[in-house]
Image (cartoon, rainbow, N blue to C red):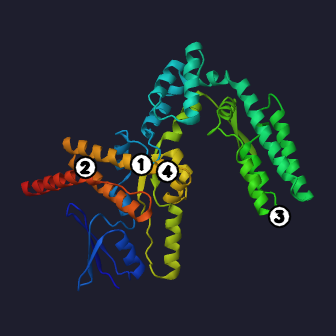
Amino acid sequence: MNINRIQFTDRYNTRQQYHSNVSLPCSLQKAADNNKDIIISHPTNEISFSGVYAFRNNLFGERFPKTFFKKLVAEKIPCAYTGVEMISYDELNTLIATHTFNKKNTIAINRLKKFEKAFQGVEKFIFELLEREAKKNPKLNLQELLQLKLPSAEKALILTQKQILSELEKLSLNLPKSEQEQITAILDKSLKKIETKNTIPEEIFRRKEFLYKLGDIKISNSELKAQIMKIAEKLPQSSNSLSAFIVKYSQPYKIKINNGKIIKTPRDSEELGIRLLKPYIATDEHIHPQKLYRQEEEIKAKSGRFSKSSGTFRVSILTTARINTEKSDTLIDKFIQDGRPEIISNIQKHVNRLIQINEVWFKKGRIEDAIKLSEYIQVLKTEFDLRSNLVQIDIKKLDPLIKKLKKTKLETKHSK
């Protein structure tokens, strides 16, 4: 089927046209149908889509740019997957520019307290620790407050690390002698580093380095290797261990090896403050993984069935940086099924909040913003309908506002 012109009609009867001489395959026609667009074929080879926008190429990015999402983040919307209140990059950049976290601990703590509702897990415990210690030690900065807990944190961390290395040693006994010896050599060196006191940052035990070396060993039994790596992954890290966090950010500096040279960067209160906030920064999370988009495009290109790339076309939703990183290239349903059932209700809460913001914008006379947000909410529903069997977004509360927006737009048009 050869298409000369595609016409997009949204619920406000605004139209966009896409001109193409590309020959569309049956699968693409089906994809459009799955996208819940109504396809009407005309003798003139013109096709009209009635419903929400059918986004291809970079239309999504053009219609909903970064400035649009910035406006949403400023309204304090919850993360679509976790439900926590997110922090904007603008807020973080202001704190960095004013060197807030290197100031007196009372000032730094007061600024951090503004984001207390966002903190979870390790960050929540660390903030509470700093707040508690600041009252007893008003002259110490944030990092110095953290260092007060270093001795006890080191003991707890060492104990956990040694227990995991011991598990690995027992499991390695089931391997052939040559493989066992390779693992034992790594374990012995690691244990020595763990037990050595007053080590400088260059000589401390590093979890990432350990996992890399362990994973690099060729083990004939793939199932046993998977078990070994699974146990090794349990080694504490600053994102999930209070003791690991304290030990890491109490160090005088961090190191990075660049072209064989060791580069030292001081660890200070500012780094600590930024670290507490960064996991909760608002980011645009791609509902369907970008990696899979690229794979789809490559298949189309190789088959010759679709010669034009999808470009930067991506439907995204606002989530915290941490959950965005955790999801990575995982399909949304798989991500939910891997122990995160709360995501389903959190997405609906996120959408409900978007609808509330939409109503506020309309009442304030921000008509263009309200129209754009209404379109975005509909696009989200379409994308989840297409990509998920678990997430069913209800946007019925948006219908009354759509009618008002349509009426306002018509009135504005007639008044000109």
The front one of 257 and 275 is 275
Badge 4 density bin: few <14, some 14–19, many ≥20, Cα 10 Å: some
Identify the secondary structure beneath mark 4. loop
Q: Give above or below for 114 relative to 180.
A: above
The image's mark for residue 278 is none
- Give, as a three-letter code, the residue at label 2: Ala
- Considering every residue shown, the one lying at the far left of the view is 415
Q: Give above or below for 89 relative to 149.
A: below
Residue that badge 2 annotates: 370
Position in image of residue 356 (x %, y %): 28, 44
Identify the secondary structure beneath mark 3. loop
Badge 3 density bin: few <14, some 14–19, many ≥20, Cα 10 Å: few
Residue 104 visible in this rendered orientation of the protein: no
Position in image of residue 149 (x %, y %): 67, 23
Residue 230 visible in this rendered orientation of the protein: yes
Mark nearest the camera among 1 and 2 is: 1
Residue that badge 4 annotates: 341
- Distance from disc 2 to disc 4, alpha carbons, whole Å, reads 31 Å
Residue that badge 3 annotates: 220
Q: In this view, does 197 lie to the left or right of 157?
A: right
Quarter of the picture holding the N terminus: bottom left
- Give, as a three-letter code, the residue at label 3: Ser
- Distance from disc 4 to disc 3, alpha carbons, whole Å, reads 37 Å
Residue that badge 1 annotates: 345
Position in image of residue 208 (x %, y %): 71, 46
Quarter of the picture holding the C terminus: bottom left
- Distance from disc 1 to disc 2, alpha carbons, whole Å, reads 24 Å
The disc, 1 or 2, on the residue closer to the chain's N-terminal end is 1
Q: Which residue is drawn at 38% across and 49% down?
A: 348
- Give, as a three-letter code, the residue at label 4: Pro
The disc, 1 or 3, on the residue closer to the chain's N-terminal end is 3
